[in-house]
Image: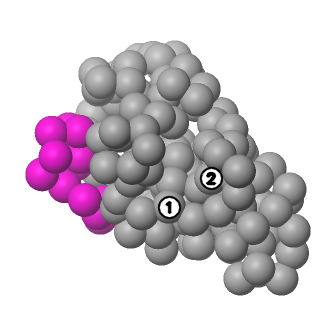
Amino acid sequence: MAAMHVETPVGTLEVVERDGAIVRLSWGASQGECATGLLEEALRQIRAYFDGTLRNFDLPLAPSGNEFQQAVHREMLAIPYGSTRTYGEIAARLSTYGQPVGQACGANPIPVIIPCHRVLSATGLGGYSGAGGLDTKIALLKHEGGFPFLL
């Protein structure tokens, strides 16, 4: 596996590639840097996202997870920039309940790129498993203008 790091408004992000696809994005820098063309492109896109010039990532992704988690990943990827969905809305699309959707969101190995921050509870923000927890979720939603009462 190869990894590179990028400084962002929500902290240092580490992006990990394996076999030509992004497999993980995490906060901090746990591995040494190993540049690849794909990782350089991923960092370019992350910088463009945070500077406001990119709304849709275009990267090969291979997130880990079981069949249900993969279905939730696809649902999250379908949420447009600046929009949100509730756990319940995604659950209804997948013929399940909100709690397993929330657990799948919390297990998302590629946050920001697979936008779990765009998934909310019916009564508020819900949770966020990335570094900084809800503060990071709020920062990402504000960045996208996706939750008006936060602005």
Check the image and report above or below for 44 versus 121: above
Residue 138 on image: x %, y %: 47, 34
Mark 2 / mark 1, whichever is N-terminal: 1
Which mark, by number, is residue 120?
A: 2
Q: Is 40 left, or right, of 122 in this rendering?
A: left
Residue 114 showing in the rendered view: yes
Q: How many marks?
A: 2
Quarter-wise, where is residue 56 in the image?
bottom left
Residue 137 on image: x %, y %: 51, 36
Where does the C terminus fall, quadrant-wise?
Answer: top left
At 12% across and 51% down in the image, what residue appears?
A: 53
Check the image and report above or below for 71 versus 82: below
In the image shown, does 116 or 120 lie closer to the viewer?
120
At 76% across and 79% down in the image, what residue appears?
A: 92
Q: Amino acid at mark 2?
A: Leu
In the image shown, does 19 or 16 lie closer to the viewer?
16
- At numbered mark 1, what does the secondary structure look like: helix, strand or loop? loop
Q: Is 4 left, or right, of 131 in this rendering?
A: left
Which mark, by number, is residue 84?
A: 1
Q: Which residues lie in the magenta part?
A: 44-60
